[in-house]
Amino acid sequence: MSIMELQDVRQVFRRGGKEVHAVNGVSLTVGKGETVAVIGESGSGKSTLGRVALGLIKPTSGDVVFDGIALGSLSKKEMRALRSRIQVVFQEPYESLNPRIKVGDIVAEPLIIHRPEMSRAQRRAAVIAMLERVGLTAEHAERLPRNLSGGQQQRIGIARAIITEPELVVLDEPTSSLDVSVRARVLDLLRDLQREREISYVFISHDLATVGLISDRVAVMYLGKVVEQGPTQEVLTNPRHPYTKALLSATLSTVVGQRREHVPLRGEIPNPSKAPTKCVLSGRCPVEIAECSTWPVNLLPVADRHDVACLRADADREPAALGGPR
Amino acid sequence: MLRVTGLTSQFRGRAGVVRAIDDVTFEVPEGEAVGIVGETGSGKSVTIRSVLGLLPSYGKVVSGSAEFEGTDLIRLHRSRLREIRGARIGFVAQNPFGSLNPVLSIEKQFRNVMRAHRRISRSDLRDLALERLESVQVRGPERVLRGYAHELSGGMAQRVVIALAMLHDPSLVIADEPTTALDVTVQRQILDLIDAQVKQGRRSLLLVTHDLGVVAQYCHRVVVMKSGKVVETGLVADVFTNPSHDYTRQLLAAVPPAPWAAVPSLSGPEVHR
């Protein structure tokens, strides 16, 4: 059963007469209780995709279907009601918390909006229970965000997101600004909460190591397109797209001497000022052939549930197939 | 090359005086790369800023020394320290756009850095700058030289900063989280570049990072810091395989293994150029 489906989503921003093609036809399905990671560097469109999934921006084209409901068909009021079921946790915990409001009131706020029938006492009890669930205490409710550590602040962000019992939570780089020792514990918390409540996660990240720990499936985005997707272990241990390989080879091991051959990409991610007319990696790719720059390359299955958008996906497997499009 | 002994610095704040680093001692031997690792607030950045005389106005070194090529940097007059910084010690900071002047052309910044330490004609300087930009793999160096920082991507800007830091052929390079602000695929390029520049010039490197993987792959020695104190130092090969301090052990355990490390053969299916 899927809880959310993104169908051929495109997002074009217009800024001062210029176009930015942030997302170029992305389809993604998130199952109930599943964690789907969206991996990419800055400019890949991963955060825009997250905002589309949250219903915060309306895609230029394509549909977002949540639990059978097309978000595009909803009125403002209906959309607001649905928000309690789709929540978000941001990267910078401190910046996403109002610095003048006590922690207890921050966590209570979604309840005031979405559960107006609750009494003050009920709300208070729910907030304390939630704080305790994320590893804090009733005493923290009286503090201001700045008097908490980064890890505690992110726990508040998580408590605020799940207090309305959402079915889907978009986690936008939730652990990127945390120190490693804190990061592991926050990931544990997210995993436990998912198991208890069958929440689905869309986990947006640039860090493959973190994604390897928490996600069931992964979609690798580059320049507004998904270039590779599949079960996390399969993609991480058997990457087929040169971009995924480059990302993986950039992750350094803490084991001395354990080094992966560097897959170099030329230059840096270009500005997405037009819709792609060729493979998105064309110009940077180490295995590019002439056909790569003639048309956009779409996702094709290479194994069970493993899709890759690359004409050279088999390049290192079947030497006989080199040099020609399939 | 660099010997830091008992370095202690304080910050004056609303809450009174805070000891930011306490009795920090370590060495950077000639030709070696030393990594300082630690989490937020461990004092790793304060340590190198103390050494370089770059503490903010509310910070102060209260005791200790930092001996570099026979001179104690801590006791040096500011103008003498400025001469050493830039000429003998190259500094690469985290944010390249903070290091570059937004209103001066890149060429003008090369000129300023050059003239701070040496007289050189305009055309000689131009040739040298072009050569140095090429050596850090900046594409279209003529265009970059004419242009301004804001026209560069993060990775290109950091390459320019590295070229500027190497301009006077320093014997020691100090880098403070030089890739943290950059994208993952660019990070590896910049680390390889710093590594190559240090090795080619037979320089020593002091690298501050929160990323244990960077230390494991690019450094000979490591200094592990926590709450302003050094908890462990030694060869990377020893400390990472057999940490003697609990904190180092915890830190190493918290880092997930490289996601590709599960691949049985390390060489794996490779992409060839």
Image (cartoon, coloured by chain):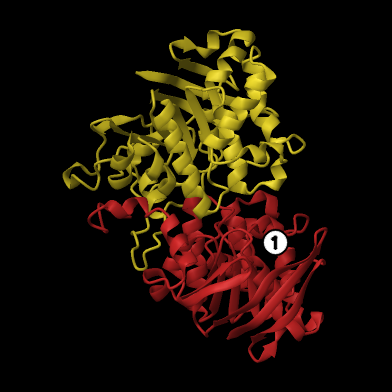
Chain colours: A yellow, B red
Chain designation of label 1: B
| Residue B212 image point, x, y percent | 47, 62
Of B158 and B4, nearer the camera is: B4
The C terminus of chain A: image quadrant: top left
Amino acid type shown at disc 1: Ser
Q: Residue at label 1? A: B99
The N terminus of chain A: image quadrant: top left
| Residue B131 image point, x, y percent | 58, 70
Side of A85 relative to B66 (left or right): left
Side of A261 relative to A155 (left or right): left
Hey, which quadrant is residue B65 in on the image? bottom right
Q: Residue at x 46, y 31 (%)?
A: A202
Q: Residue at x 59, y 82 (%)?
A: B171
Of B115 and A122, nearer the camera is: A122
The image shows residue A298, relative to residue A271, as above or below, that is: above
The single residue placed furthest to the bottom in the displayed view is: B70
The image shows residue B118, relative to residue A240, as above or below, that is: below
| Residue B20 image point, x, y percent | 70, 68
| Residue A199 image point, x, y percent | 44, 26
Of A101 and A65, nearer the camera is: A101
Q: Is label 1 in a helix, a strand or a loop? A: helix
Q: Residue at x 39, y 31 (%)?
A: A195
Of A177 and A102, nearer the camera is: A102
Hey, which quadrant is residue B240 in on the image? bottom left
Residue A273 visible: no
Q: Residue at x 64, y 30 (%)?
A: A107
Q: How many marks?
A: 1
